[in-house]
Image (spheres, grey):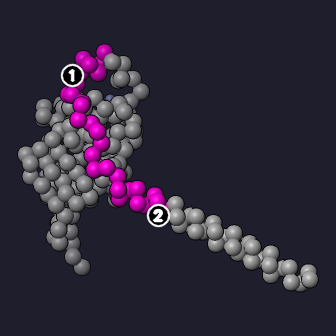
Amino acid sequence: MRYNNEPSALRKIAMSIAAGLAAIAFFALIFTSSYFFLPPKSPDNTESAPTKNTLAGSGLTVNHGHAELTVLVNGDKLDFSKPEYQNKSIRIHLEDNDGSTLHIHDRSTRIEVFFESVGMSLDNNCLQIQDGTSYCSNFDNQIIFSVNGMANAGFQYYIPANGDTIVVSYGKIEHH
Ligand SMILES: [Zn+2]
């Protein structure tokens, strides 16, 4: 009888492992699905452009984060130091005519909040700049979103962290 019990115990363990793997696969599927079915835009329409006084008076300037942002289109850097890119969202913005340092006052803000606040849009296929021109990935060109030198799949959903260096680049890809 003892001899017969051992395979049974092994089978129970095997079944537990199988059930565990199935559960992991199930949650991985849910997680992956939620990424693809995220709402396309965050509800940010009620936001108005703040002035620097609003920021200073609100106390929100304390303990906020900074990230460096560069957007390249065919090698040319967009000039974010222009007034139309400055102080557009209280949650995440550029200020002081500086064209690269994002001030992150809401640490949970996706980077799309910045892009939408300045009349741009970004997803993993197209970058639309302020004049309405869209640059979309195709056979010869590609958008790359990178954080701290590494390609990142987040694109518009990426939540910038303090100290990040973020580069969005559209341009030619090499075929091999
Ligand atoms: Zn700041």
Q: Is residue 128 visible?
A: yes
Horizontal side of 32 relative to 100 (left or right) equals: right
Q: Earlier in the sequence, mark 1 or mark 2?
A: 2
- Quarter of the image for residue 87 reads top left
Report crowding for label 1: few under 14, some 14 to 19, many 20 or more residues within 10 A (C-alpha): some
- Quarter of the image for residue 23 reads bottom right
Residue lying at the far top in this picture: please name it: 57
Circles 1 and 2 in contact, beta carbons < 8 Å: no
Horizontal side of 10 relative to 127 (left or right) equals: right
Residue numbers of the magenta segment: 28-57
- Quarter of the image for residue 48 reads top left
Q: Which residue: 77% across, 77% down?
A: 10
- Judging from the image, what secondary structure is the residue with disc 1 in? loop
Horizontal side of 37 relative to 136 (left or right) equals: right
Residue 136 is situated, as x and y percent measured from the top left of the image, at 16, 61
- Quarter of the rendered image showing ligand 1: top left
Disc 2: residue Cβ within 8 A of ligand 1's nearest atom: no
Image quadrant occupied by the N terminus:
bottom right
Closer to the camera, 78 or 53? 53
Q: Which residue: 31% across, 15% down?
A: 57
Mark number, residue 51: 1
Report crowding for label 2: few under 14, some 14 to 19, many 20 or more residues within 10 A (C-alpha): few
Say if 152 sits above or below 113 in the image: below
Q: Is residue 152 visible?
A: no
The amino acid pointed to by label 1 is: Thr
Residue lying at the far right in this picture: please name it: 1
Say if 34 sits above or below 119 in the image: below
Closer to the camera, 154 or 97? 154
The residue indicated by pointer 2 is 29
- Judging from the image, what secondary structure is the residue with disc 2 in? helix
Residue 36 sits inside the magenta stretch = yes
Mark number, residue 103: none
